[in-house]
Image: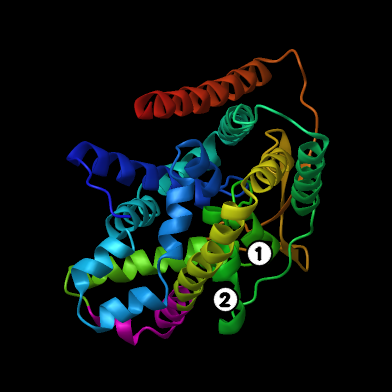
């Protein structure tokens, strides 16, 4: 399964992982959708599927080269390396843009999802009534999830592990936003904001020779949380990929129809015109460790048509559509 890749192809895979990782962190946007449009979704699923008993036997026997080739490790390391790096780079830029240009960022994402639907839908040449029924099923499921009410934060380690399994689903299930699911579970800020920030602080402290962080009980608590969350994510990636690999081989068209529907339903999550509702307790806003107000939910509304703000938002929607279609057709042309 291991492919010989040029240096340019390796850089390209790393950049794709970068984009996927950034998408995974944004509530409402699915990294799986990115992998689907950039045409590495099935290789991603089948590569994780190769992490099985046979792979561990090769590892135990010391056949590292065979293990590396059998699991398509080069591909996994490049994609996951880009995804992890994005949490400390691209995703920080996205955080800034969401705070200062929220409407335009959501409009861009909204357009990108529409572009994904159009691009993926072109792969269906013969539409049947059954295909439409699966698309409708996926859309209804996606819409239902987008209007659920978030739960309260829960830092119990068993629940954090489950959040890791569920949260990573955005990488393996196009249209399903792992970040938004974490918001619904009440742990988005805990796992993708506070814990990541503390981990970054610990890493920078160690690199500068400051090991006092290991005596800080609060930082150790967050380190334990993100370690358990990461373990759950790895377990989820491998286990979900095994299930998806099985169904993709047997019911590829049905799975793709449900994916198209689910992505369509997820448009409700990233609707650009929405008012942020923040979590409160006793008339006081709940804050994260950086002093930012914790998001509880969103109230959606229709925009005023004749305003410059709306015109710019619509422009960014079309920009997002054009970007995805352009990338998709470029990838398709490059492989033909």
Q: Judge from the rendering whether residue 235 lies leftward or rightward of residue 174; answer left or right.
A: left
Pick the quarter of the image with the N terminus. bottom left
| Image position, residue 186 (x, y; %) | 67, 66
Apparent side of residue 59 relative to residue 290 in the rendered image (left or right): left
Q: Residue 160 carries which label?
A: 2
In the image, residue 173 above or below residue 114:
below
Q: Provide the secondary structure element on which disc 2 rests.
A: helix
- Tell me which residue sits at (64%, 20%) in the image: 314
Does the magenta portion include 226? yes
Q: Does the magenta stretch include residue 25?
A: no
Identify the magenta region: 211-227
**SS category of the residue bearing label 1:** loop
Q: Which of marks 2 and 1 is nearer the N terminus?
A: 2
Q: Where is residue 299 in the image (x, y as percent from the top left)?
A: 78, 44
- Outermost residue toward the front? 250
Q: Mark 1 points at which residue?
A: 286
When asked about the image quadrant of residue 183, the answer is bottom right
User: Label 1: few (<14), some or many (≥20) within 10 Å?
Assistant: some
Can the viewer see residue 1? Answer: yes
Q: Distance between the residues labelled 2 and 1?
A: 20 Å
Going 79% across and 59% down the picture, which residue do you hit? 149
Of residues 284 and 47, the one drawn nearer to the viewer in this rendering? 47
Where's the C terminus, which quadrant? top left
Seen from the viewer's position, the closer of residues 197 and 144 is 144
């Amino acid at each position: 399964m291991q492919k010989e890749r040029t240096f340019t192809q390796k850089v390209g895979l790393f950049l794709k992982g970068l984009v996927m990782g950034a998408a995974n962190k944004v509530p409402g946007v699915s990294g799986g959708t990115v992998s689907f449009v950039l045409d590495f979704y099935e290789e991603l699923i089948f590569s994780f599927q190769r992490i099985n008993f046979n792979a561990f036997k090769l590892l135990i026997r010391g056949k590292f080269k065979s293990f590396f080739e059998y699991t398509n490790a080069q591909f996994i390391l490049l994609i996951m390396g880009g995804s992890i790096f994005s949490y400390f780079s691209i995703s920080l830029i996205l955080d800034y843009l969401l705070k200062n240009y929220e409407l335009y960022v959501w409009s861009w994402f909204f357009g990108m999802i529409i572009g994904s639907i159009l691009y993926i839908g072109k792969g269906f040449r013969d539409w049947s009534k059954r295909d439409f029924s699966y698309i409708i099923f996926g859309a209804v499921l996606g819409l239902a999830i987008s209007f659920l009410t978030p739960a309260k934060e829960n830092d119990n380690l068993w629940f954090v592990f489950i959040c890791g399994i569920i949260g990573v689903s955005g990488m393996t299930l196009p249209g399903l936003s792992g970040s938004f699911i974490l918001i619904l579970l009440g742990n988005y800020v805990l796992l993708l904001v506070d814990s990541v920030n503390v981990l970054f602080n610990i890493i920078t402290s160690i690199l500068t020779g400051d090991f006092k962080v290991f005596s800080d009980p609060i930082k150790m608590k967050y380190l334990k949380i993100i370690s358990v969350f990461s373990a759950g994510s790895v377990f989820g990636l491998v286990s979900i990929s095994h299930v998806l690999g099985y169904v993709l081989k047997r019911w590829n068209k049905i799975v793709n129809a449900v994916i198209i529907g689910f992505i369509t339903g997820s448009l409700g999550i990233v609707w650009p015109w929405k008012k942020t509702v923040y979590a409160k307790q006793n008339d006081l806003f709940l804050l994260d460790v950086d002093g930012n107000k914790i998001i509880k939910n969103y109230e959606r509304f229709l925009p005023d048509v004749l305003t410059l703000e709306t015109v710019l938002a619509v422009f960014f929607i079309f920009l997002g559509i054009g970007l995805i279609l352009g990338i998709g057709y470029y990838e398709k042309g490059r492989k033909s």
